Amino acid sequence: MENKICAVIRDILPLYCDNAVSEESKKIIEGHLEGCEGCRQYKKELKEAGNVNVSNNKNAISNETANIKQIADRLRRRKRNIVIGVSAAFVLALIVLSQIFQISVIAGTSMEPTYSDKQDIIINRMSYRFSSPKRGDIIYFSHNDVLSIKRVIGLPEETIELKNGKLYIDGELLEENYFDREVGNPGDITYPVTLGNDEYFVIGDNLDNSLDSRQSAYGMIQRDEVLGKVIR
């Protein structure tokens, strides 16, 4: 009989340990435990097992928290490295761009209507690093200690001639959309003019109000005076 009672008590001891029994059942169980060493030992083992599970759960939670913190730290470091990398790349790009492109401001009206006085322009200083100016290019150059922009009309070793307000290159009439008007001001040079092997004949788009290669005091532009190409 005693063994059957112990079996019943042990079946409900887990509920007792979890405070999941009624007050009446609790009194019966506690009364039995006072006189039964075996059931008291069984109750002790249940509690120890429960404590182990709680401890394991706490350790698991602690380990999981540590893992989350490690992941968060790695993400923060990665984010910081990305920000540093992007910032460095941005600064490097600015340095490179500053070496290639230059912003300048037009002074004067010699390039109207293409460019106006005080208008901002962008110059590509690498355009002629591996090539030479082409006819129609608007070049940025230093000539007679003055920085200027003009349009290239004549290329090295070409012959420039002005007849009845029309420009001829090596005997061929210059017909371009940027040069569709008569040249009312021929300047004071003597035509025809044959350029040297590194000379350029330049004219401002404002044909009636431009100091350029049509004037002997201005002359031709040398290749080593060209600093870049106006791209906007």
Image (cartoon, grey):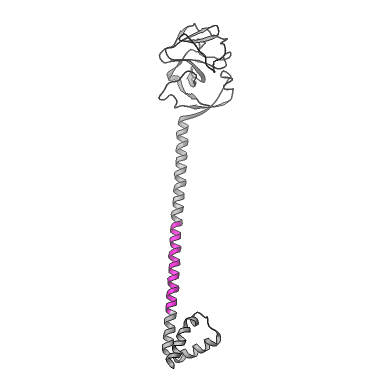
Above or below 1: residue 114: above
Q: In the image, what residue occupies the spot 49% across and 88% down? A: 30
Q: Is residue 200 covered in magenta?
A: no
Above or below 219: residue 51: below
> Going by the picture, which residue comes out furthest to the bottom?
1
> Which region is colored magenta?
48-71
Residue 158 point in image, percent of width and height = 44, 12
Residue 87 point in image, percent of width and height = 47, 42
Above or below 164: residue 31: below
**How many numbered discs sit on the rendered protein?**
0
Residue 18 point in image, percent of width and height = 50, 79
Q: Is residue 66 covered in magenta?
A: yes
Q: In the image, what residue occupies the spot 46% across and 49% down? A: 80
Question: Nearest the camera: 181 or 122?
Answer: 181
Q: In the image, what residue occupies the spot 52% across and 88% down? A: 27
Q: Quadrant of residue 7?
A: bottom left
Question: Nearest the camera: 19 or 129?
Answer: 19
Which quadrant of the rendered structure holds the N terminus?
bottom left
Q: Main secondary structure of the magenta part?
A: helix
Residue 223 point in image, percent of width and height = 43, 18
Q: Quadrant of residue 88?
A: top left
